[in-house]
Image (spheres, grey):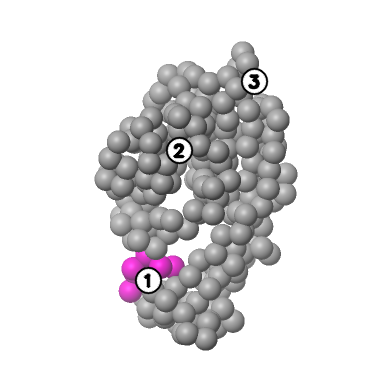
Amino acid sequence: MTDEWSPVAVAWARWWGTFAAPVWETFADGSRVLDVGCGSGEFLASLGARGVAGADPSPAMVQLAAAAAPGADVRVADAEALPWADDSFDLVTAINALQFADDPDAAVAEMLRVTVPGGHVAVANWAERARNDLDVINAALADEPLEDGDLRLPGGLEEMLEPAADVRSGLVEVPWTAADDHDLVAGLLFGEDDPSLARTILDAARPFRTETGGYRFVNHFRWAMGTKKPGR
């Protein structure tokens, strides 16, 4: 897998590291938790417990995650090949991560493999474009409109967890804010200096400007959680 994230890892951590925090609260803590596609490690740090682990294909992200959660076992690994033994964790999560896997179904199979029978596998991803203000900006920046993939549509995550039992799902509001024009552009371009793109972003973001001069975008994540069946 090409490492596209290491060059922007520090910028990601600054602007997006805690973005999915409303989703974290949806997943019950376990004594042993693995976060697949852990990024810069803010979720691991929020658990504040021993026995947590993280995997990410980006070495720079893993370095940041290890610093954010010093007690965690954080390793460079693809979601489709997790370097832990069978039945190692009570809860395995993938938050805003499966869309980056080469084979999402294989990634879910690996997540189930390392989960103890009776433990939980939980996934979360952006909902469809109509539910995300930030997709207005993405559409303005894109040469062609982006299509909603299966992981974003109702029922998509539930279908991926079909091998699990007792699958439940929901929708969580995930806002993103920027204090001013500078923070808006820096957060969306990961610090890249491109006046043309900056102008496009500012023009598209006008409807989301607040009275204080900042910006607030209301977005949503879909999530699903299932239980590992005995004997899998």
On the image, the x and y values in percent for residue 207 come to 59, 81
Circle 1: is it few (<14), some (14-19), or many (20+) Cα within 10 Å? some
Q: Is residue 97 left or right of residue 48?
A: right
Q: How far apart are the two marked residues, 1 and 3, measured between alpha carbons?
A: 45 Å
User: Given contact means CB atoms under 8 Å apart, are the residues at marks 3 and 2 in contact?
Assistant: no
Which residues fall within the magenta stretch?
186-193
* Side (left or right) of 114 relative to 72: right
Q: Which residue is mark 3?
A: 229
| Residues marked 1 and 2 touching at CB (< 8 Å) | no
Please give the residue where the numbered disc 1 appears in the rendered image.
186
Query: Which of the labelled discs sits on residue 35, or is there none?
Result: 2
**Closer to viewer: mark 1 or mark 2:** 2
Q: Earlier in the sequence, mark 3 or mark 2?
A: 2
Q: What residue sits 45% from the left and 29% below the top?
A: 31
Is residue 53 covered in magenta? Answer: no
Q: Position of residue 13 (x, y in %)?
A: 36, 56
Q: Position of residue 153 (x, y in %)?
A: 69, 51
Tell which circle, 1 or 3, labels the residue nearer the N-terminal end: 1
* Amino acid carrying mark 1 in the image: Ala
Q: Badge 3, how many Cα within 10 Å: few under 14, some, many 20+?
A: some
Vertical arrangement, residue 91 with respect to residue 138, above or below: above
